Image: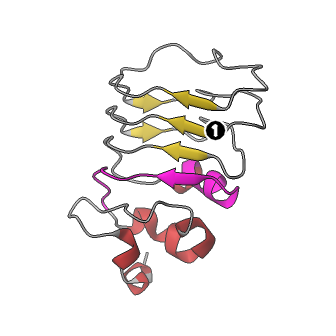
Amino acid sequence: SNTPNIVGTFQNLPNLKDIAIGWNSLTIIPTNFIKTGSTRLESISLTFNAIISVEPGAFDIVEGMRINMTSNSLSTLDEDTWGPFLVGGVLLYATDNPLSCGCDIAWLFKEEQSLGQVSKDTTCSDGENIYNLDPSIFDFC
C-alpha cells in the first residue's frame, strides 16, 4: 500500500479547519489517519488518489464537515467506516469512484438520513446515479 506514515501528524490542532492531501497516490487510509481533536474541522480532501479502502475511525467526526473522496478507487462504501460519519452529519463526496452498488451499500437505503449525506452526483461503476437506484433491489440483502 502507498500510505505515508503521517498517522498522528494532525493531532492536537484544535483550530485546524481544512486538510487537503490530494494527488498523492494513497491507496489505504488507516484508522487514526487524521485525528486532529479540532471541533472546527470543515473539510478533509483526499481527491485524485488511488484509495481503495478507508478503515473505520480514520478521521475525526465533526457535524457539517465535508469529506471529499472524489476520483479515487473505492468500490464500496463500507458501513463500518462511513456509517458513523453520515449519521454524525458529515457530508461525503464520492463522485468518480467505481462503486459496485450491490448489497454492500444496502445500508444506505435502510437509513435514509445516511443516504442524504452522500453527494447527489455519486454514481455506480456502471454510471447509474445512486439516487436513481430502486431501494427494493436491496430487499434481499
Res. 135 image quadrant = bottom left
Q: Which residues are magenta?
A: 81-100
Q: What colour scheme governs how the chains and residues are painted in the rendered image of this protein?
A: secondary structure
Q: Secondary structure at mark 1?
A: loop
**In the rendered image, is residue 111 in sight?**
no
Q: Residue at x 47, y 43 (%)?
A: 68
- On screen, residue 88 above or below 40: below
- How many marks overall? 1
Residue 30 x, y percent position in the rendering:
53, 29
Q: Position of residue 78 (x, y in %)?
A: 49, 53
Residue 16 in view of the camera: yes
Residue beneath disc 1: 57
21 falls in the magenta region: no
Q: Residues within 10 Å of mark 1 (few under 14, many from 20)?
A: some
Residue 97 x, y percent position in the rendering? 31, 50
Task: Between residue 45 and residue 113, name the one nearer to us.
Answer: 45
Q: Quadrant of residue 83?
A: bottom right
Q: Is residue 4 above or below residue 35?
A: above
Give me the residue at 35% from left, 78% from top: 132
Quadrant location of residue 2? Answer: top left
Extreme-bottom residue of the structure:
136
Image coordinates of residue 80 in percent, x first then y, are 58, 51
Residue sitting at 30 percent across and 60 percent down? Answer: 100
Residue 80 in the image: above or below residue 12: below
Task: Tell me the kind of residue under disc 1.
Answer: Gly
Considering only vertical position in the picture, is 44 above or below 34? below
Q: Residue at x 43, y 75 (%)?
A: 141
119 relative to 110 in the view: left or right = left
Q: Is residue 98 magenta?
A: yes
Quarter of the picture holding the N terminus:
top left
